[in-house]
Image: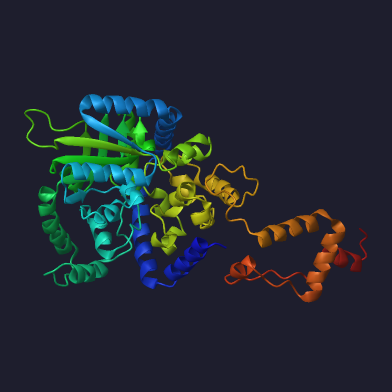
Amino acid sequence: MDKPTRQFHVRIQEALNDPQIRANFRRAMDGLMTKRANMFPDPVELERLRDLGAAVRRNALAQLPELLERLEAKCAENGITVHWAESVDEANRIVLDICRRHSAKSVIKGKSMVSEEMELNHYLGEFGIEALEADLGEYIVQLAGQLPSHIVMPAIHMNTRQIAELFAEKLEGVGYIEDAEELTKVAREILRHKFFDADVGVSGVNFAVAETGSLVLIENEGNGRLTTTAPPVHVAVTGIEKVVENLEDVTPLLSLLPRSATGQNVTTYVNMISGPRRDGERDGPQEVHLLLLDNGRTRIHADPELRQTLQCIRCSACMNHCPVYARIGGHAYGTVYPGPIGEILMPQILGCEEVGALPGASSLCGACGEVCPVRIPIPKMLVRLRKEAVDNTGASPVKGGGAQRSFGEAATWKGWEKVHASPALYRLATRTATAMGGLPALGPLKTWASVREVPKPAAKTLHQRLEERGNSR
């Protein structure tokens, strides 16, 4: 196995051995599943809404190149400058160039998973530009020097006591305060000044509307609204798949996303940005930039089946219902996008050499597919990507396809195939196993057997039992 795979297994074991992590996630996931269920009391309405949401996303992906061109033209008409980036390196350079043109020393960031994908904070820091997270959960994990452990709730792996200890350690003049409301107040007082002092605001995008050139952002804390209006320059970063055709397409997605994610009918704030500040307006940035990142998405889009990965609206419902994620948490995956969606997205972005083992972190129970609001067939995709990870034909459309192939494992299954294709070999193998009292669990089977009882062959075969009773074959 390669090094990243070994690290993945180590992180899994560390998470399983941490009772605090398991308790935090179990409590959080149970609450989120209950809230989602309460938001969809009518199963017929839910299935119809899921059909509509899936149709909206599939329609957008079916005409993705055309919609992106329409989005660019409409944004330009609205006064938004559009930038295209094929890779995260190119995307980071574009943001840095914008900051340098404005002699920016500080950046305030709203919640954005694409900026995490870019490692934008670290990149800007290398050039002396402070990038501070404004979302409370993101601010907490930034203080802790961690990646988000959840797409919607980045600090869900920490309880109040752990956050209190972090604030007392990292924030000057702040003592130990084990009260959630007071901790929020501390963060708010620090961040409020940053919004108005920042030279550039960076945000994500939930949906980009090709018809109107509007950027839709949803949030609960108000930090996104401040990030996009208080600084003189606003840079929105998003993946190319977030485009939708019409403004009316946003309606079913806005109904699905909050209810699936946090159990809300709608988020506290729904922001629609269609350009910079105009004459006579009292607030808003003087410049708005939209950065469209590819980072492997075009390659994913080219495969009709794998394209369904890009339907995702980042609600995290698949994580909240995944029995594996609930036990190991987000950091065990070691990637920006954890859980079931990460298991199918990250191997396609980073390659099977790095994270080809991720699709194996699933019981294939099907819960992720059952709750996905836009009907991504995640279990089917997991099976497909497991196959791609060991495909040795050289024809895999997935980056690094076949990198997880093991000669020993392949030889074992080839031997298994030959034994079960030959009655004589099968009889010899079963008699040998019976005589030995079973076969030893070696290689990958050793790990499998460490948490399971290894089946032992019966002392006599069915045919032998029948012969002893006088029954002929």
Residue 331 in view of the camera: yes
> Which residue is depicted at the point 44% across and 40% down?
297
Q: Compared with residue 380, is residue 354 higher up or lower down, i.e. above or below?
A: below
- Residue 187 versus residue 303: which sits nearer the camera? 303
In the rendered view, does 209 fall on the left or right side of 174? right
In the rendered view, does 277 fall on the left or right side of 455? left
Q: Dividing the picture into quarters, in which one does residue 81 lie?
A: top left
Image quarter (top left, top right, bottom left or bottom right) of the N terminus: bottom right
Q: Dividing the picture into quarters, in which one does residue 469 lie?
A: bottom right
- Residue 32 versus residue 404: which sits nearer the camera? 404
Q: Dividing the picture into quarters, in which one does residue 20 lie?
A: bottom left
- Residue 183 versus residue 124: which sits nearer the camera? 124
Q: Position of residue 459 (x, y in %)?
A: 80, 73
> Which residue is depicted at the point 50% across and 35% down?
302
Image quarter (top left, top right, bottom left or bottom right) of the C terminus: bottom right
In the rendered view, does 109 fall on the left or right side of 468? left
Q: Position of residue 55 (x, y in %)?
A: 43, 31
